[in-house]
Amino acid sequence: MATPAAGAAHSRTGFSLRAGAVDVTPSRPGPLAGYEARRGAVSTGTNDPLHATLVVLGDEAERMAWLALDAIAVPAELARRLRDAVREGLADPDVFVVAAASHTHSAPRGWVGSIHPGHSGSIESDDVDELIGKVRALAADLAKTEPESVAGTWGSGNAVGLGANRLTPGGPHDDGVGVLALRSVATGALRAIVFDAAVHPTVYGAVNLRWSADWPGVARRVVSAAARAVNESAGQDDGAAVVLFLQGAAGDVSARFTRRGADSREVARLGTIAAAAVIETIAHDGHELNGPMRRLSRVIELARRPLPSIEVAERELAQAAADHAELADMPPLDPRVRLSQSRVDGALVQRGLVAAAPDDVIRFPISVLAIGDVAWVHVPVELFTSIGGRIRSGSPFPVTRVVGYADDYLGYMVDEAAFEAGTYEALSSYFLPDAADRLVDEVRQMMKEIR
């Protein structure tokens, strides 16, 4: 368990920054992760490149990093290897690293294998080795450069129309976009931008067989281009800023009810909505973050929910399939069809859970990073909006952002309404809704300890 640094001094002269990104698109075809309906179909090309983005920040007492990957998830072993690669490349064994996935459903299955009982797929060691090598090389390249002194500002905006509650039109979701902007102390040029939003990157559906970062990839490119233009217009011809995306509490939020299609044009439209919120936030500067930086990580143990018998699981699957068959004449992009299909998928995963007989106790890593009065909470699940809201509302920090899909993948953590409705997310979850109570209490305690 990591502990927060004691007595860290305020840093008003800036933080040290190293930041970069690397194209990690696989060099060979392979199955795509995210949709069982693909049935293992192999990729046919690339819509847009997959990236690993690394932002390393330090002050007088602390060094910490975000490594964000265009992937469906970062299961525990992959997360460990990614963190090790960053530390090895930086030649800094003590830097604290959070590895987080964007959750795009158009990334390699070979990186992660079967991320959950009931899902198909196996890890392809050559693909993973290629990924790890690229991340290590990125970190090594950054280590060859002198860290730059940067000043941080924080702001938030709203990306209205990007996503919505995917289970109930008009249900709870969070349009908020959090933005950390890091500018050169010497020149004022934008050097790195870290932003978060909570919407599944699932504009491309199961029929897509081309690698893609989905809407977050577009958002990063648009923000990067805007940052380059801002720097050049201000007389700082220093190139584009590195843009890193963190996926939020998106367990029940997607573009299911907001998208107008499932093609590259729609990916571009929604990515631009997200980028516009980031750009507008940066234009208003936000407020300065003066430190200190601190962090705390912990692994808690949560009880696995009681599972039905295999006979009950089979009956629930048969019923879900029969209900879905009644919608056969409806357009495939109709949200009701997708919701019905998701219930079939959930029943399949639940049957897989029953067959796998997972441990009764689930190890659950949590980390909190803080800069000044802004805290980022990282959890290894697809967290429902209401649970993310509880974490924020009980936080001792003026600003708290919740990041999912980090440092492991443990499926969904749902609220009571979803559990009672028997949604895909609830059927596939390891946890009962009351596991969220333990999580919220633990996170609040951790934030108090570093506040």
Image: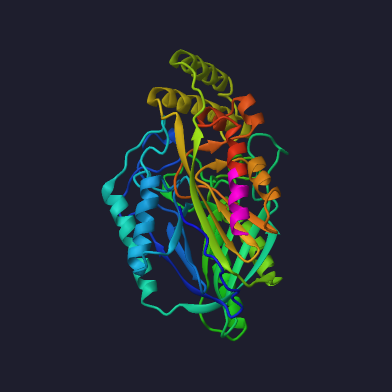
- Drawn side of residue 32 relative to residue 170, left or right: left
Rendered location of residue 381, percent (x, y): 52, 42
* Residue plotted at (58% across, 24% down): 329
Could you tell me which residue is drawn at 39 percent across and 62 percent down?
A: 23
- Report if residue 340 lies within the magenta region: no
Classify 20 as above or below 195.
below
Q: Is residue 360 above or below residue 81?
A: above
Q: Which residues are magenta?
A: 442-451
Tell me which corner region of the image, top left, top right, bottom left or bottom right, holds residue 189: bottom right
In the orientation shown, which residue stands out farthest toward the left? 126
x and y percentages locating residue 22 in the rendered image: 40, 64
Which residue appears at 62% of the width and 82% of the height?
233
Residue 449 within the magenta-colored segment of the rendering: yes
- Quadrant of the image containing the C terminus: bottom right
- Asked which quadrant contains residue 179, the reply is bottom right
Q: Which of 437 and 5 lies nearest the eye of the viewer? A: 5
For residue 167, which quarter of the picture? top right
Residue 400 visible in the current orientation: yes
